[in-house]
Image (tube, coloured by chain):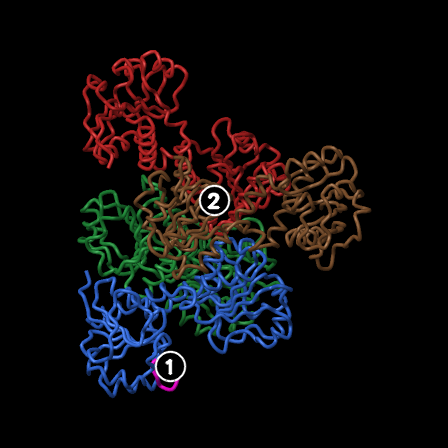
Chain colours: A green, B blue, C brown, D red
Amino acid sequence: MRHERNVWVVGGDMRQAKLAELLFDDGHTVHTWALEGTEEGPVRAPDLGEAALADCVILPLPAAGEGGRLNAPLSQERPPLTQVLDALRPGQVVCAGKVGRELLDQAKERGLRLVDYFTREELAVANAVPTAEGAIQIAMEELPVTIHGARVLVLGFGRLGKLLAHRLNALGARVSVAARKWADLAWAEAYGYGAEQIERLDGYLCGYDLVVNTVPVRVLDAERLADLRPGCLVIDLASKPGGVDFEAAVRQGVRAIWALSLPGKVAPVTSGKIIRDTIYNIWNELGV
Amino acid sequence: MRHERNVWVVGGDMRQAKLAELLFDDGHTVHTWALEGTEEGPVRAPDLGEAALADCVILPLPAAGEGGRLNAPLSQERPPLTQVLDALRPGQVVCAGKVGRELLDQAKERGLRLVDYFTREELAVANAVPTAEGAIQIAMEELPVTIHGARVLVLGFGRLGKLLAHRLNALGARVSVAARKWADLAWAEAYGYGAEQIERLDGYLCGYDLVVNTVPVRVLDAERLADLRPGCLVIDLASKPGGVDFEAAVRQGVRAIWALSLPGKVAPVTSGKIIRDTIYNIWNELGV
Amino acid sequence: MRHERNVWVVGGDMRQAKLAELLFDDGHTVHTWALEGTEEGPVRAPDLGEAALADCVILPLPAAGEGGRLNAPLSQERPPLTQVLDALRPGQVVCAGKVGRELLDQAKERGLRLVDYFTREELAVANAVPTAEGAIQIAMEELPVTIHGARVLVLGFGRLGKLLAHRLNALGARVSVAARKWADLAWAEAYGYGAEQIERLDGYLCGYDLVVNTVPVRVLDAERLADLRPGCLVIDLASKPGGVDFEAAVRQGVRAIWALSLPGKVAPVTSGKIIRDTIYNIWNELGV
Amino acid sequence: MRHERNVWVVGGDMRQAKLAELLFDDGHTVHTWALEGTEEGPVRAPDLGEAALADCVILPLPAAGEGGRLNAPLSQERPPLTQVLDALRPGQVVCAGKVGRELLDQAKERGLRLVDYFTREELAVANAVPTAEGAIQIAMEELPVTIHGARVLVLGFGRLGKLLAHRLNALGARVSVAARKWADLAWAEAYGYGAEQIERLDGYLCGYDLVVNTVPVRVLDAERLADLRPGCLVIDLASKPGGVDFEAAVRQGVRAIWALSLPGKVAPVTSGKIIRDTIYNIWNELGV
């Protein structure tokens, strides 16, 4: 259905390797560089000499590694990002993840059409699925009880909170959701979960076997951690600075796990698919 | 837990009658006027003489009936809304549904603290539950096949689309969601439904036994209606102007049902509870 | 995939009419007699003259109407069943529903290979789906609250109890199951429902908004009906003698609905499909 | 509600340790012997001197370890089982798991009322929950894709197959069930899964990302293993001899995991609760 395109996947981890294979399987001409993880399919280019011919060049997530170099953990090559950009042609479509100000400026100087796929809402939604599964996997590994029948509190009811509560409930947990906004609490009730105002949790935290935080705000401070029942597991999915006072947790003997970047870790193939789908959407919009 | 309050419920249909009873059951002092549907509990006031003493006066949904009169279908009384407002005191909290510009101005002139509970997000979310159930009830009544195994298309993935798809899927339907935004399609996939771009439906509509529209835009025009398979049922839940060309549907022999205001019709008690919960939230915020 | 067969569908209601159409759609040669409900597709035979040529003759559910006549509510023809059987050839495969002793003997005398499709376990399981949906439809129509959030008691946890509890739970009801056997209670818990011993219900029945019985034993006698909360709806799905003392219910003002034979009523097309699938299984086993 | 009983828990692993604590928490007087895993609560008896006073003595699962000795992995004590039985009094109720012929005879000689809790249907059902979760945990750990969206085949639709398919489906997998009996296939369809005849799988096995076997019969032989797509994960939950030709799997490079006794491994506390509930049922029946 889609016509074949010429794509270069430059740098990245297993997600980009899978992405390259998936693009190849869809019938595109795919070259990789600074990405040694792919199996048969995509062609490994010796250098970036022909990258300027590509309909789209895909950089990793995040695009930049240390010291302004390409993020390329699977490769011997770690050239400066500017070296990659210099190999491209003005007007060329470049997709990259977590684009910082520096890369943005560099792309602009060279007249590249740079799109950050990590800022796309559909990628964030899709990534919440492997994140939720990863959290459940951790809970299964750590808890001496089944998810079924466990009393679970999900802090926050955004993307991740919604998909996580859905799965926990489906596995038979007794799920409560704590949120700040009335509308979020109404959503929690509409899906059949218990709904608690996050400001009024004090004194009730002893009722849970598992607490999963999705809010990037310090919701579980020392005082609230002290309220948890012995053996309660805490999983924090919030990006930095996180929602848990981990030092207090250690002091108080609370098992608290800060689980970040789960999609790439627990489901690299799915992560590659998610990036592919998002890039297809970008192409669709840009007319690539 | 909550302290007892003095509440007047003035006008309205069965939802307000149930609301008055529920407030009474929660321990509040409740008077009704122009609302003859309540059973034991609330006191029916002979007039509005003491309404100015109330902590909160609750007007119906919508507050205004025809000709600027109070919406009071269960009562003999249909006074002008201004007459009701004149009985209140400046600074008094008044909750009303679907407040129009006129009522807004009248309340302002009299110094009333008027809050429209129908604009509250949490009420909209909660109301989507009885609306979704009502749509399913209609589908069960009208279709000669079970929901289980039926191929269903839900148009739109906002509040109502989400809760409706959730329930249809749970009943065993094969649910596809059509939406415009990539993020909404990602949501649909994250919940396990089929996802279709709403612009690309043409030619695929023949695959469904049931199509439910939630988008207040003409998505099912004559051409698309002609694409439906014989016997396909169409339910339109979108408020005016609706999403279906009903005249074309009649001409083409498509069964299309425009189902509006379902919460009050299919679940008046639940509707009363939803209004009560929203009013509690308003009180909480206003410090009533 | 299946090779085309010569099938006669003789007598029956809308389910048999749909069955005939479905068999036609699958590529079989289909004749009907004493069944005027079919639309284009199957051929209406003027008489049973060529029925003896069929690979399989399908009689209704139940096969026998009043006075030993064919059950043929959609037709002018109501011949004695023996007249139908006399038109067939020894060794011919005949599928019929709810076969009584008399029909069994008559078929044996004529050397027919008679199979009762209604006794098949897979048909009973499949029929539990439209029965469960029908019960939910009734509950939606009758209750002033949503299924979502309603407290529901399901009496019995066999086929119907399982599929009904599954759907009610999926719609957001708080489902409890009452059963006699420990293993059934363990099943209920494994699926995440409350579990109550049926012998110990006394005193707890006031906690439900809806009680659905699936046990063909008098579980809801006058005393237990008196325990129900005002407004509680009772739906009895058990075949005769049923599980509810309906006279006591009337006396005590309890709304109790005895809903029998729901599949044919709420979903005739699905019912036709279920019979078709079962007949395919029978053919598969008999080598038709 | 229950009156306090005198219970001895003798031998066993973490499940019995948890069991002892749970019984203590329910208000019973609990002694343990040959079981050093318990924390505060139950009293560790120095010997079996007062065990004859117990209302019930609980032996492990399995009761017998090597050489006719008590199964007591957490203890220094490993007396012959006969020594334990000799300490008890005729007529005393003894609950034990996986009772063999030898123990049965020994108990009979001593006039003990021995009940095997492992043969109880409700325990088998309840144990299927942690087994299903354990299988999902393994799949999450091993697969590079999410369960969500994965194509999964469940072989067998008994207790375990039902609860496993339920959870996989809830997590967003596309679940197919293969079974032999038509009624089981009808069940699978009634719950909304794909249904495949187990005899007709050949040629279709390439369509799955995950195959979980629950049938204790060699269903996945070398030929069928060869049909699987590269990267497909096989989990065998069937007790010996299992359903997979593991030697062929190794030869052919198929990842196949034989996961036995999951409940005690993945959820020892839940396992303890399940045994407790079953013992309560036994007491209820025996009038202990």
Same chain assignment for discs 2 and 1:
no
Residue beneath the point at 31% across and 59% down: A156
Is residue D47 rendered to the left or right of residue A34? left
Residue beneath the point at 24% across and 37% down: D1
Q: Which residue is mark 1?
A: B65
Question: Disc 1 on helix, strand or loop?
Answer: loop
Please, which chain is the residue tagged with disc 1 on?
B
Mark 2: few, some, or many residues within 10 Å (few <14, many ≥20)? many
For the magenta stretch, what is the residue range? B65-70
Mark 1: few, some, or many residues within 10 Å (few <14, many ≥20)? some
Question: Disc 2 on helix, strand or loop?
Answer: loop
Is residue C84 rendered to the left or right of residue C165? right
Asked if disc 2 and disc 1 are in contact, CB closer than 8 Å, the reply is: no
Which picture quadrant has residue B45?
A: bottom left
Q: Tell me, yes or no, whether the highlighted magenta stretch contains residue C248.
A: no
Q: Position of residue A270 (x, y in %)?
A: 48, 53
Q: Is residue C23 above or below residue A101?
A: above
Q: Tell me, yes or no, whether the highlighted magenta stretch contains residue B67.
A: yes
Residue A74 or residue A226, whichever sits in front? A226
Closer to the eye: label 2 or 1: 2
Q: Which residue is mark 2?
A: C242
Q: Amino acid at mark 1?
A: Gly
